[in-house]
Image (tube, grey):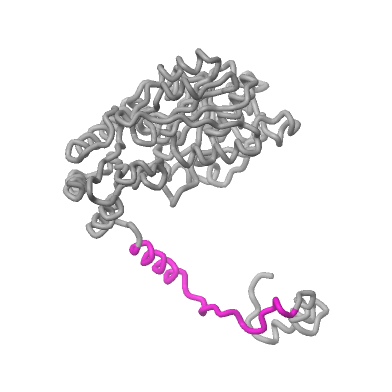
Amino acid sequence: MRYLPKSPSERQQMVEACGLSSPDQLFAHLPDEVRLHRALNLAPGISEYEIVQYFRDRAAECASGYASFLGAGVYSHFRPVLVDTVVSRGEFLTSYTPYQAEIAQGTLTTIFEFQTMICQLTGMDVANASMYDGSTAVPEAAMMAVRATKRSGVAVSRTVHPEYRAVLTTYAKNQGMPVAEFGYDGDSGSANLEDLERSITADTAAVIIQSPNFFGVVENVKAAAEIAHRHGALLIFVFAEAVSLGLLEPPVDADIVAGELQSFAISPSFGGPFAGIMATKERFIRQMPGRLVGETKDSRGNRAFCLTLSTREQHIRREKATSNICTNQALIALMATVFLSVYGKEGLRELAMQNLSKAHYLAGKVKPRFSGPFFNEFVADCGAKSPYAVNKALLKKRIVGGFPLGRFYPELADSVLLCATEMTKREHMDTVAQELA
């Protein structure tokens, strides 16, 4: 059908062409009580420019033009224009899974470059072609550790993102994988390593820590790795703020790295889609879920790329699959790849330094709850004020405040998680500080 028939005669002709006497006969199989015996209550159609203007008006009613101090796993960073210019090209935007290397060299090349950059950032030997997001990368890493060690459970710090831990618990429930949580130090805000020692058993396959952790505090990765390895467990290093990798030492002491790349030019977009990563040491390569793009030579001896490893249920017998995640975030991962190409090593370091400096400027004007070193996010004590009252007051000044921690940490109900990035202005930081004073 090329067009919708407008006149009654045209509609009747269509009905008769179907061998029917009335359109109602098309719905005769439905019970009368579920049928709608009236016209749909829809407004008349409007033009395209009116539709566009409608959405612009609605967008103006949202947080457009507001400053934001909200982090907690999703961060406000500048997105270079070149990112959308590249990913909007048809060969990237509309391409599907690169099963056939001979016609997908462009996509395979970008994935290969993505994997290479992730290895450089994390200090790992191999990285896969991306995961759905950071929250699903964590349980996938935990199950990978269980397979690699032949043990059954994991120990995870309470300083790991609460939503990541929630997804881990969901995965673990039907995997028969016990999850033990260990606490944090009330002074520094970092993982309590003494509590970690008590939590590890002979069945612990891996220890999971995040750095910077959910409170923004930089963890002692070397110490956690030493404890895990002494007990025969692996260390899974998690990150939610990817920009921190431009300044902090790569987690070379970890066995598996899982994280979220939203900070690398991926728009917050109300929570997704994002791109997770997983990287590991070479000896664990066959336990890594998802895909791995590798370099090879074609029939003429030229450099070429192909899917070297695909331990997915679509490609091998299901009982041998390392994951039931059947795709990767190639387009979103491409955004991160373009971002890293634009900034380069020095640019990423300078960006990280800006984040560090601005967060410490803000922290110098308020009362931080913890004493541990932090990157661009920290916990502030609201004193006698409620974090929600502070945020309500800030909202009137067109500022989105920090994240009230009472939702996930009842003992920190009087505290708020504040984040400052390169997008944060001094006058807005001063306003937040005045409201918290």
Asked if residue 96 is positioned above or below residue 198 in the image, the reply reads below
Which residue is more in the foreground, 53 or 267? 267
Q: Position of residue 13 (x, y in %)?
A: 75, 82
Residue drawn at the location 44% of the way across and 69% of the way down: 51
Left-right relation of 14 to 75? right
Residue drawn at the location 79% of the way across and 81% of the way down: 16
Q: Residue furthest top?
A: 230
Q: In which quadrant is the N terminus drawn? A: bottom right
Asked if residue 27 is positioned above or below residue 131 in the image, the reply reads below
Asked if residue 400 is positioned above or below residue 17 in the image, the reply reads above
Kindly indicate the quadrant of the structure image that contains residue 262: top left
Q: Position of residue 44 (x, y in %)?
A: 51, 79
Q: Is residue 20 visible?
A: yes
Q: Please count the marks in the image.
A: 0
Q: Is residue 51 magenta?
A: yes
Residue drawn at the location 66% of the way across and 35% of the way down: 99
Which residue is more in the foreground, 291 or 93? 291
Q: Is residue 74 magenta?
A: no
Q: Residue furthest right?
A: 19
Q: Position of residue 237 (x, y in %)?
A: 46, 26
Residue drawn at the location 56% of the way across and 80% of the way down: 41
Which residue is more in the foreground, 63 or 112? 63
Left-right relation of 237 to 108? left
Q: Position of residue 275 (x, y in %)?
A: 49, 39
Q: Is residue 80 visible?
A: no
Q: Which residues are magenta?
A: 32-61
